[in-house]
Image (spheres, rainbow, N blue to C red):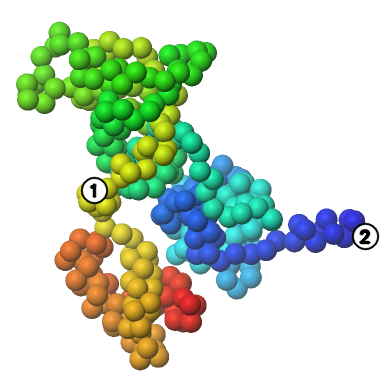
Amino acid sequence: MLPVIEAAAKIPCWLPSREAIARVAHHHGYPTENAQLRIVRYVRARRITRGRTAEGWLVSLFPAGWREGADLDAANLELDELELIEASLLPAPGESEGPVERAWQPADRAVAYLITGYLVEWADWTPEMIREMERGEIKLGDLCRHGLPTEGQKSLQAPRELIPRAHFRPEMVTMKAFPANPLHLPKVVVRVDGTVGVSPRHRQQDYMGPPWCLIEVDWARLKPAHSPTEPPRGPLPSAEWTLAVTRKLQGGDKLKGVTRKSELARLLAAKSEEAAKAGEIRRQLKASYLENVLIDWGCWPLSSLE
């Protein structure tokens, strides 16, 4: 009887890619865009190998297109939940689903939090986050200088210890080279790789402190540092914006009279014109286009949002 139970436990449970991305995002505390990048990264590493079309056809995730990265949601694929669990993208049965809080956060996650409000590890960063990296590294260095508890090692073999806040002061950068602008002195920063750096980067060799590495910061003290008034992340992906607006309209009872997919598409198209002008999305979405993708993006039928 035991072999039968073991065999049953290995029967694939197929999750629509949209649901898989949402669950991975929830489990890791990620935005959906970063969750999708994480899944694709595991596909590249061949830790996720099996997929299935909505029609039930099994597909391999090994082709070059998948290794280079693909839009899982747009492909309308289903993923094997067992593989997601084995890759630690989802919790095992019986375990709670959601991020586990750590008392100390590594530098890459701390910088990501200051940029976006999410603890995202470096390998799952989006291009928009990478463009904001220097700003986040400078802000983390400023927080450490002002007393954010910070731990690190002076070498890979050295013990962990608290880093004195004085090691993040501008005085730790020798002034043998004059700054291009005397009003903007070099800053000591915390790099995403967990080391101490200097901004601008070409002044790195002028840092006079120890070569700190494997830096982590106190999560409880870092939490209040992310302000909702931070500069926006940039335009949202069309699918993410459309689903968010549809949920908002549904929650506000604005869709009670909507009975056809074409009606919702026209309503969202009008909203997208305003959103494009405000920079929330890259471009206005046409009603005809929306009508074709509302099901794939999880916006139709409306009952699926309840």
Q: Return the x and y of residue 262 as percentages of the image width and height.
A: 35, 86
Q: Earlier in the sequence, mark 2 or mark 1?
A: 2
Q: Is residue 217 left or right of residue 114?
A: right
Q: Return the x and y of residue 35 as percentages of the image width and height.
A: 47, 52
As drawn, the label of residue 1 is: 2
Q: Could you say which is closer to the camera, residue 244 or residue 20?
A: 244
In which quadrant of the rendered view does residue 16 lie? bottom right
Q: Which residue is mark 1?
A: 230
Decide: is 5 above or below 41. Answer: below
Q: Return the x and y of residue 152 as percentages of the image width and height.
A: 43, 21
Q: Is residue 27 left or right of residue 190?
A: right
Q: Is residue 172 left or right of residue 151?
A: left
- The secondary structure type at the circle numbered 1 is loop
Q: Is residue 19 visible?
A: yes
Report how far apart the C-alphas of labels 2 and 1 lie in the structure: 58 Å
Tell me which residue sits at (44%, 51%) in the image.
Answer: 30
Q: Is residue 10 left or right of residue 232?
A: right
